[in-house]
Image (cartoon, rainbow, N blue to C red):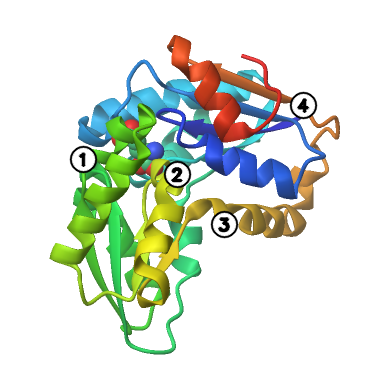
């Protein structure tokens, strides 16, 4: 069986790439819902239904475990899919979100000002604060800022403009912060620009650098899942809507061969 990845668009491919670099032996299937991007401005119920369609696709393609490599969908649907959808339709499969492993990477030993940037839905869901309340110890002061312009810009590969907006927003609204969480998988593509700008002043947390280790740890802990995974190293990418420029962007994001 395979490992599935879900995103509302191409952003999650950066997570897939990082994971396949660390764990190249497994088979992967990716579902990018480019027909309905961006999820960040959609209603909760709509995001739930769209994510459920993606989960069904991934499970039908043989995923034993599906990772919602999208903060917006994780915030809105992960728990509900685990509680309501899986037991009824796929009781032997697993769904993991991306928010809890991101929170776990924060250091809680000293008082820290953290800013999270994400989509409107992710920020309004309050999910990061909720998970922080569970995992943290009160030492983390979290400011959450939605920057709805970023996903469409990044999806069009206009990375310099996206980075400029992100930097200006962080400086204006969260100048005091010392840690920046990129709470949207699309933002992994502007992490270099942000690091070059903020240098030592702000630590940039990017999910493509977190998920590979977290997934590896999960698979080590869950032999009942990892023992089912095929070792053929195949990747299959499915987008719900194709555009001519996606081919080039996919090669850029994945850096290698893929099928559609
Ligand atoms: N990549 C998604 C995320 O991590 C959001 C993109 C969208 O708005 O659809 O939140």
In this rendering, the label closer to the viewer, 3 or 4:
3
> Is the Cβ of the residue at disc 3 closer than 8 Å to that at disc 4?
no
Q: Residue 200: in sight, yes or no?
A: yes
Q: Reading the chain from its start, which is encountered first: label 3 or label 4?
A: 3
Of the pair 207 and 43, the residue shown nearer to us: 207
Q: Reading the chain from its start, which is encountered first: label 2 or label 3?
A: 2
Seen as rendered, the residue at the extreme bottom is 110
Residue 52: quarter of image: top left
- As measured in the structure, the alpha-carbon distance from the residue carrying label 3 to the one carrying label 4 is 22 Å
**Split into 4 quadrants, where in the image is the C terminus?**
top right
* Residue at 19% across, 57% down: 168
Q: Reading the chain from its start, which is encountered first: label 4 or label 2?
A: 2
**Split into 4 quadrants, where in the image is the N terminus?**
top right
| Residue ID for mark 4 | 234
Q: Which mark is residue 86?
A: none
| Residue ID for mark 3 | 209
> Is the Cβ of the residue at disc 1 closer than 8 Å to that at disc 4?
no
Q: Reading the chain from its start, which is encountered first: label 1 or label 4?
A: 1
On screen, residue 215 versus residue 51, left or right, reads: right
Residue 237 at x, y = what percent?
60, 21
Q: Secondary structure at mark 4?
A: loop
Q: How many marks?
A: 4
Is the CB of the residue bearing disc 1 within 8 angstroms of ligand 1?
yes
Judge the density around disc 3: few (<14), some (14-19), many (≥20) Cα neighbours within 10 Å: some
* Residue at 46% across, 60% down: 102
Q: Is 127 above or below relative to 257?
A: below
- As measured in the structure, the alpha-carbon distance from the residue carrying label 2 to the one carrying label 1 is 16 Å
* Residue at 35% across, 35% down: 154
| Residue ID for mark 2 | 189
Q: Quadrant of ligand 1?
A: top left
């Amino acid at each position: 069986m395979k490992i599935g990845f879900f995103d509302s668009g191409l952003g999650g491919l950066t997570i897939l790439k990082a994971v396949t670099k660390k764990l190249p032996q497994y088979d992967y299937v990716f579902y990018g819902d480019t027909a309905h991007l961006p999820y960040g401005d959609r209603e909760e119920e709509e995001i739930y239904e769209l994510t459920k369609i993606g989960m069904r696709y991934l499970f039908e393609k043989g995923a034993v475990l599906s990772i919602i490599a999208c903060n917006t969908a994780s915030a809105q649907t992960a728990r509900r899919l685990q509680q309501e959808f899986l037991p009824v339709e796929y009781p032997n499969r697993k769904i993991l979100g991306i928010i809890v492993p991101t929170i776990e990477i924060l250091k809680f030993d000293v008082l820290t000002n953290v800013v999270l940037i994400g989509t409107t839905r992710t920020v309004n869901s309050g999910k990061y604060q909720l998970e922080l309340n569970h995992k943290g110890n009160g030492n983390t002061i979290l400011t959450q800022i939605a920057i709805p312009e970023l996903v469409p810009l990044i999806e069009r590969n206009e990375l310099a403009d996206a980075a400029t907006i992100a930097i200006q927003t962080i400086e204006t609204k969260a100048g005091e912060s010392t840690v920046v969480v990129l709470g949207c998988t699309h933002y992994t593509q502007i992490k270099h620009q942000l690091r070059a700008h903020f240098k030592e002043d702000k630590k940039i947390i990017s999910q493509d650098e977190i998920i590979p280790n977290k997934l590896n740890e999960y698979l080590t802990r869950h032999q009942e899942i990892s023992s089912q995974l095929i070792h053929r190293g195949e990747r299959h990418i499915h987008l719900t809507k194709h555009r001519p420029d996606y081919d080039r962007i996919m090669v850029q994001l994945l850096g290698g061969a893929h099928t559609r």
